[in-house]
Amino acid sequence: MSHHHSLITIAGLIAIAAFLFTIPFMGLDAASADNPIDPLAKRELLRQNLATMQAELESGHHTFEIGFNPAMQYSIDQLCTYIPQSQKACLYLTQSKNIATVETLPSSYIGYFTPIRSQGACGGAWAVASCGEFESVIKKKDSIEVNLSEQQLISCNPYGWGCNGGDFYYDQFVNPGAMLESCFPYVGLDIPCVDTCPYPYQAQGWGYVDPSVNVPAVDDIKLAIYTYGAVGACVYVDSYFQAYVSGTFSKCKKNVSWPNHTIQLVGWDDAKEAWLLKNSWGIAWGENGFMWIRYNCNLVGYEANYVIY
């Protein structure tokens, strides 16, 4: 991952503007079915928005870059569809003990994760993050990389969740278990459940890092990442987050009461005072699909959770 921290120059902005006018826009805004937006007008609006955001960043001494990326062909409402549910965690007695104490934690740590996925136009980040979390735990424990089926969660959950949104859903991994991507591949659409696949991986349970608070303490999240390899969590996404290219995201929105997106936290760096966040918007977003984001910025770590395997 790049660790280049300088801000975009005027020449860079001109290059972005030139690039914007050459890209095809496949995405739809929420209102575009009734009110189509001319692609050229949309590109010009995006260019203006980026220039305004860039000026704001330069006045605030931020240490991250923004620019055009493929996730910006979709609206934030399409990509970010976290629907909070008051499910009771199925905390089994096999819960692992933390394998470190706060005093013994390293100042930086990269945990366990599988390759970046892309949710496309489907608001299925909740399913991608859920599968990613179980994949992380399997990778840490078994030293193998598996690719679990996000489509299983989207199509087979009993709550009607799908591309319109949802929350972390691990109960399906406990019973009946997790299908492989190769048997029920991701199409990013609400399609009927396939129940003919085997379930080669079963979770024992899952839990919240701290059920008593929305965003656990930084040290508690670190201990969970260190113990399980990664945690699932939520964050609040705005246009700056969506346009993130590299560096440590520090444009923290004040007074945000609710997150809108599900992600994983897979590491940290105290020198940056930041988490390493794994997103679900493909490798062309951010630092090869990842982001460094300041501790406690934009509710990052909300509902932090882990799978027991």
Image (spheres, grey):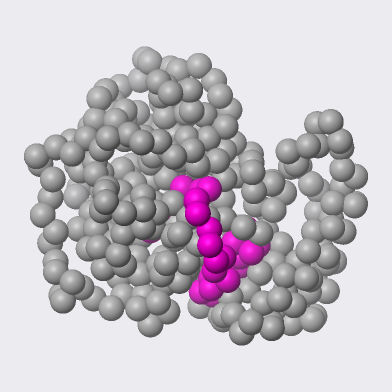
- So how many labels did they put on this image? 0
Would you place residue 275 above or below residue 12 in this image? above
Instruction: For residue 232, say whether it is visible.
Output: no
Could you tell me which residue is drawn at 79 percent across and 81 percent down?
A: 10
Quarter of the picture holding the C terminus: top left
- Where in the figure is residue 107, as x and y percent of width and height? 28, 78
Residue drawn at x 23%, y 76% as measured from the top left: 106
Relative vertical location of residue 97 with respect to residue 50 in this rendering, above or below: above
Left or right of residue 266, residue 239 in this image: right
Residue 308 in view in this figure: yes
Residue 300 relative to residue 139: left or right: right
In front here: 233 or 72? 233
Residue 245 lies in the magenta stretch: yes
Quadrant assignment, res 215: bottom left
Left or right position of 70 against 138: right
Residue at the spot x=55%, y=41% of the render? 81
Q: Splitting the image into 4 quarters, where does residue 130 fall?
A: top left
Which stretch is magenta?
A: 240-265
Q: What residue is drawn where x is 44% and y is 60%?
A: 300
Residue 263 appears at what percent x and percent y? 45, 51
Viewer-proximal residue, 298 or 3?
298
Q: Position of residue 244 (x, y in %)?
A: 61, 65
In this picture, residue 6 sits left or right of residue 289: right
Q: Tell me residue 291's x, y (percent).
A: 50, 64
**Looking at the picture, does residue 81 appear above or below residue 66?**
above
Q: Is residue 70 magenta?
A: no
